[in-house]
Image: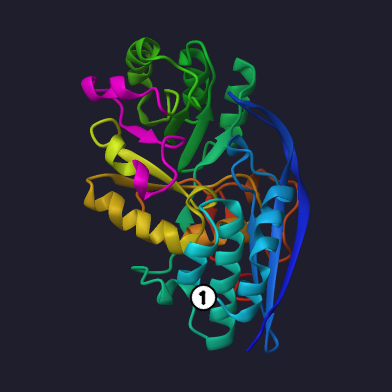
Amino acid sequence: MTRKLQIRPHAWKLKEPFAIARGVRSEARVIMVELQQAGSVGRGEACGVPYHGETPETMAAQIEQVRAAIEAGCDRQQLLHLLPAGGARHAVDAALWDLEAKRTGVPVWQRAGAPGWQPVDSAVTIGIRGIADYEAAARERAGFSWIKVKVGPGSPREAVAAVRRGAPDAHLIVDANQSWTLDELRDYALQLRPFAVDLLEQPLAAGSDAGLCEYTCPIPLCADESLSTADDLPRLVGRYQFVNIKLDKVGGLTAALQLASAARASGFRLMVGCMLGGSISVAPGMVLAQQCEVCDLDGPWLQAEDWPGGIVYRQGRMSLPAPALWG
């Protein structure tokens, strides 16, 4: 039976400007996909990977090129060969999972073989700001289990110290978004040890991290920009202890589950992350989160608006998506 495909761009307003080492954003620009078949509607959403040049316009163009195959009934495995890794495939893959769940009554987490279906604790992000504002933001999040601290070039010590003062009990992730050198990492990691940082995310530029093979960091290192697909895993062995799997990068939950299996087989510990976007963009990530040690799916929490009936965050704990929303 044929399907009807609809694609539309959307921009979600953020609660505040979101600043990281690469720049500042005031909205989350996404693409929304709907697949209609026999009275059921499956939905997907993706931000894509802006630092790979993806925009709602480029993602829509990619999907349009394979519209005929999607509407003719391609499945998720066939989609892996129709579209490359990236946001376009994530959006369509999510819509296919959702459509299948709504048509069969079998929830996505069961069909995906997840070990369970429980609410998860997500890290919530504090973007780059002044030192006093880091502490104030941390105090507002003091009851959250995980906080991610965005930092840029230059010593992160004062920023992390301010967050630790504001949230003395939270697990901390420090994310430099590729802005340090290896010598800076050696220095900064020692500076951060007194603040009980749990994870350092992508301190060095992707492709310039070979020096990590000969360096033992006192804080576990997590690859983010250095990892898109399973093809990247061999070069990350010996450099990182964790990998951050983002569905926008790997191209959807179907590919993400395969990547997670390959990453575990290569000895990596797992983190699931997200780009900016609404609840439907991160709902598939909650399926992967059931097998991850660290979860960073706070995109909707950073927004001033979201899907009706979207995921609820209570001190960082994400409610399961309602069946009517996704999955």
- As for residue 223 lying within the magenta part, the answer is yes
Residue 213 visible? The answer is yes
Amino acid bearing label 1: Asp
Which quadrant is home to the N terminus?
bottom right
- Give coordinates of residue 171: x percent, y percent: 41, 36
- Give coordinates of residue 313: x percent, y percent: 59, 53
- Give coordinates of residue 169: x percent, y percent: 42, 34
Residues shaded magenta: 207-232
Identified at 55% across, 65% down, the residue is 93
Q: In this figure, which residue is indicated by the disc labeled 1?
A: 75
- As for residue 11 lying within the magenta part, the answer is no
Neighbor class of circle 1 (other Cα within 10 Å; few <14, some 14-19, many 20+) is some
Identified at 44% across, 33% down, the residue is 173
- Give coordinates of residue 188: x percent, y percent: 39, 14
- Find numbered disc 1 in the image and state the secondary structure of the residue it sits on: loop
Q: Quadrant of residue 72?
A: bottom right
Which quadrant is home to the C terminus?
bottom right
Q: Is 292 rendered above or below residue 124?
A: below
Q: Is 221 rendered above or below residue 58?
A: above
Q: Which of 177 and 325 is in front in this view?
A: 177
Q: Is 190 rendered above or below residue 15?
A: above
